């Protein structure tokens, strides 16, 4: 069965789906996106993702292409049309099509909306987490508003490619000696007292929806969460490390720049937190 995409109001076979070459997303990365997981028939953290979607649009003054209620219907229809079980949904909105010129186009320019969906293999994701992943560190060379989930991801792509070339799964981005976040995930460590440490919200990280839920899950497990920046040196000495994102859920990190973290295997804190996170999403 061919995959179906949603493009500006129409459900189209993916291979025929296209946007205009003067779409501002294509020319200026003038757009935003979200990634949502659907597992066991439930959309994980959908409300949180839709809230951030609205925030990203508002921060960039891009008009919402359709209402939140309509977007929910499109998401459900796309899954149905693709006959998907467990899957991830990608949704992207841009400022629309206009003759190339840096300032915003006229206010009546229609924003563009594109959605795709593809199957995910939860077993595979679980197997990856059970083994743990390696990360490398790279300088954080991104712009000053990475709290907005824009499609302008070139520095993230360069960092991720560097990670892949070193057989790692993620690159942790470092600014002024501190780890901000991963190229497509939030970064966490567990210190010698068992405290979970992750960079505070602000303009220097994307406020991960998984991060937010993971904080609530950790607290429900009586784990102490401290939102502060940590150094690479602290990370290297950490008892445990892990990453959070829609696609990684909570995934233990077992090596940083080739140095083993803890005893080089997924630690108990990350493992318990992942289980609690999965349970939470199965329940809400
Ligand atoms: N990335 N930080 C960055 C830079 C990200 O790109 C992401 C998500 C996160 C985690 O956010 P969340 O928990 O809401 O998924 C943090 C998505 C999955 C992506 O680009 O594919």
Image (tube, rainbow, N blue to C red):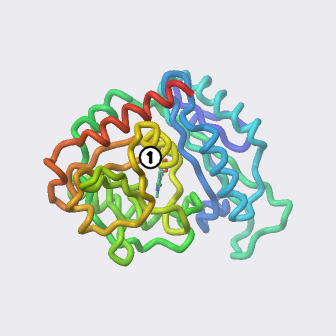
Q: Is mark 1 within 8 Å of ligand 1?
A: yes
Please state the horizontal and vertical placement of residue 283, each as a whole percent of the image: 53, 24
Please state the horizontal and vertical placement of residue 255, each as a whole percent of the image: 20, 54
Please state the horizontal and vertical placement of residue 40, each as a whole percent of the image: 49, 22
Q: Nearer the viewer, residue 214 or 192?
A: 192
Q: Quadrant of residue 178?
A: bottom left
Q: Nearer the viewer, residue 183 or 11?
A: 183
Residue under the image location 41 percent in, 61 percent down: 181
Placement of 100 over or under 7, stated as above or below: below
Q: Quadrant of residue 164?
A: bottom left
Residue under the image location 40 percent in, 66 percent down: 229
Placement of 169 over or under 217, stated as above or below: below
Kindly state the secondary structure of the residue where label 1 is placed.
strand
What quarter of the picture does the C terminus occupy? Answer: top right
Disc 1 crowd, CA 10 A, few/some/many (<14, 14-19, 20+):
many
Q: Nearer the viewer, residue 101 or 53?
A: 53
195 to the left or right of 4? left
Residue under the image location 54 percent in, 74 percent down: 144
Furthest residue in direction bottom, as rendered: 176
Residue under the image location 26 percent in, 61 percent down: 235
Please state the horizontal and vertical placement of residue 13, each as a whole percent of the image: 59, 33
Placement of 126 over or under 182, stated as above or below: above
Reading the image, the residue beneath label 1 is: 245
């Amino acid at each position: 069965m061919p995959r179906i995409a949603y493009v500006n109001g129409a459900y189209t076979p993916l291979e025929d789906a296209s946007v205009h070459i003067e779409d501002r997303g294509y020319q200026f990365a003038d757009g935003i996106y979200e990634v949502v997981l659907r597992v066991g028939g439930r959309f994980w953290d959908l409300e949180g993702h839709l809230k951030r979607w609205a925030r990203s649009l508002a921060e960039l003054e891009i008009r919402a292409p359709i209402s939140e209620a309509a977007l929910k219907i499109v998401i459900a229809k796309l899954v149905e049309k693709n006959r998907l079980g467990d899957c991830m949904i990608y949704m992207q909105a841009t400022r629309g099509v206009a003759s190339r010129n840096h300032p915003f186009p006229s206010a009546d320019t229609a924003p563009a909306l594109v959605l795709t969906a593809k199957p995910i293999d939860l077993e595979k994701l679980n197997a990856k987490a059970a083994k743990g992943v390696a990360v490398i560190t790279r300088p954080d060379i991104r712009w000053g508003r990475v709290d907005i989930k824009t499609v302008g991801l070139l520095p993230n792509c360069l960092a991720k490619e560097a990670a892949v070339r070193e057989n790692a799964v993620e690159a942790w981005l470092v600014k002024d000696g501190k780890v901000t976040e991963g190229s497509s995930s939030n970064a966490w460590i567990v210190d010698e007292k068992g405290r979970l440490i992750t960079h505070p919200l602000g303009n220097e990280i994307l406020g991960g929806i998984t991060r937010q839920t993971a904080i609530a899950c950790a607290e429900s497990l009586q784990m102490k969460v401290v939102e502060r920046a940590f150094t690479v040196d602290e990370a290297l000495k950490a008892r445990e490390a892990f990453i959070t994102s829609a696609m990684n859920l909570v995934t233990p990190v077992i090596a940083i720049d080739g140095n083993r973290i803890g005893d080089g295997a997924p630690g108990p804190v990350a493992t318990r937190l992942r289980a609690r996170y999965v349970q939470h999403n199965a329940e809400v």
